[in-house]
Amino acid sequence: QVQLVESGGGLVQPGGSLRLSCAPIGFTVRAYSMRWYRQTPGKERELVASIDVHGISINYADSVKGRFTLSRDNDKNLLYLQMDNLTPEDTAVYYCNALSHIWGQGTQVTVSS
């Protein structure tokens, strides 16, 4: 059975930082292109960042460009999302994704003073 497990969410003040982790179970981070999404109540899930299968091409949504950094550790088999200079607009549940159907359970990020 393949699945993804996210961790690292929490409550942070505006301007703060968090690092999310995504651990694949049943496959490796090198096997597929992978993505981070986020979703707030009443809104569609938004693509935040993606990395191709080779780990070379990394793309970001305009809303997070320059503040978020996606990376992959092949040895630890983990995908990360480093989030800096967070704003209240970044508050959401963040999901890790591989292919079109493998999703994690999500991790809540709340940015508030």
Image: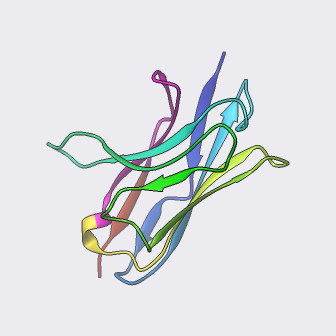
Residue at 52% of width from left, 25% of height from top?
A: 99
Residue at 29% of width from left, 75% of height from top?
A: 112
In depth, the one of 61 and 1 nearer the eye is 61
- Rendering colour mode: rainbow
Residue at 37% of width from left, 80% of height from top?
A: 13
Q: Magenta stretch?
A: 90-107
Location of residue 56 in the rendering, given as x and y in whole percent from the top left corner: 66, 50
Location of residue 102 in the rendering, given as x and y in whole percent from the top left corner: 52, 25
Location of residue 111 in the rendering, given as x and y in whole percent from the top left corner: 33, 71
Residue at 59% of width from left, 39% of height from top?
A: 5
Q: Is residue 62 rendered to the left or right of residue 57?
A: left
Q: Residue furthest top?
A: 1
Numbered marks: total = 0
Q: Residue furthest left?
A: 42
- Which quarter shows the C terminus? bottom left
Height in image: 26 above or below 105? above
Q: Is residue 49 rendered to the left or right of residue 42?
A: right
Tell whether position 21 is magenta: no
Height in image: 21 above or below 65? above
**Quarter of the image where one finds residue 92:** bottom left
Q: Is residue 72 rendered to the left or right of residue 12?
A: right
**Quarter of the image where one finds residue 67:** bottom left
- Which quarter shows the N terminus? top right
Location of residue 91 in the rendering, given as x and y in whole percent from the top left corner: 30, 62
Q: Residue furthest right?
A: 75
Tell whether position 101 is magenta: yes
